[in-house]
Amino acid sequence: EDQVTQSPEALRLQEGESSSLNCSYTVSGLRGLFWYRQDPGKGPEFLFTLYSAGEEKEKERLKATLTKKESFLHITAPKPEDSATYLCAVQEYNFNKFYFGSGTKLNVKP
Amino acid sequence: DGGITQSPKYLFRKEGQNVTLSCEQNLNHDAMYWYRQDPGQGLRLIYYSQIVNDFQKGDIAEGYSVSREKKESFPLTVTSAQKNPTAFYLCASTLGEGGYTFGSGTRLTVV
């Protein structure tokens, strides 16, 4: 069965302490991989789309990368306002469905 | 500005009662989706629709129903057959590529 697994489930960082979040997937044919940010009580907000291995996207302190089996969301010098749950989703070639991971809850302390 | 509007933000359901969650989009997207989010779990697909007057069951459709009479609207009814409806419900839409646009969600609680 197709799966998306995110790790770690929760991550605590000090302000300025860089780290990475992982999203591994096992869909048979990847059409796209998506990263979202979700604040408590709100809907997910789109961050990045990655389509092929080797692709990278950047936005402020965030950088997303993609290999054939996983994606990383690198957070450089995070700030407290980066605290949120980060969701990964994959879209298979039969693009009716997206598969979501359970998310990584990031807490950045000042 | 284009987007997805979900209402209400909070909803309380009594035992045996049906309730309807509203989802409206002005993005001109063809496909619309309903997801359920529970703490510590990924989003689970309830129903989706790729075109007006057509919809398909997702992974957890039991106890839910939908309609798609207009391109802009995709309401979700949580019926009394859904035994554990307390959750955060998210509506989303897409053109097919480029990922979803999500609404702000409805939190449903059984009282």
Image (cartoon, rainbow, N blue to C red):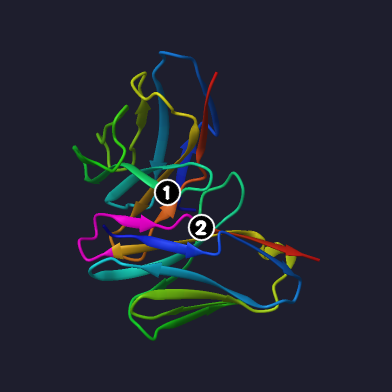
Total number of numbered discs in the rendering: 2
Q: Which residue is mark 2?
A: A103
Say which quadrant the C terminus of chain B sits in: top right
Residue at left offset 32%, top offset 52%: B28
Q: Quadrant of residue A28?
A: bottom left
Magenta part of the protein: which range? Answer: A92-102
Q: Which residue is mark 1?
A: B43
Q: Is residue B11 magenta?
A: no
| Residue B69 in the figure: left or right of residue A15 | left
Q: Quadrant of residue A21?
A: bottom right
Q: Secondary structure at mark 1?
A: loop
Residue at left offset 47%, top offset 54%: A102
Q: Quadrant of residue A20?
A: bottom right
Q: Is residue A34 above or below residue B10?
A: below
Residue at left offset 38%, top offset 61%: A4
Residue at left offset 65%, top offset 79%: A76
Circle 2 chain: A
How far, Cα to Cα, is label 2 from label 1? Answer: 9 Å
Label 1 Cα neighbours within 10 Å, binned few <14 / some 14-19 / many ≥20 = many
Q: Position of residue A89 (x, y in %)?
A: 40, 61
**Are the numbered discs 2 and 1 placed on the same chain, yes or no?**
no
Q: Is residue A97 magenta?
A: yes
Q: Position of residue B13 (x, y in %)?
A: 49, 20
| Residue A94 in the figure: left or right of residue A19 | left
Q: Position of residue A58 (x, y in %)?
A: 53, 79
| Residue B65 in the figure: left or right of residue A73 | left
Magenta-colored segment: predominant secondary structure: loop
Residue that sits furthest to the right in the current view: A110
Disc 1 residue type?
Answer: Leu
Q: Is residue B79 above or below residue B60?
A: above
Q: Position of residue A3 (x, y in %)?
A: 34, 60
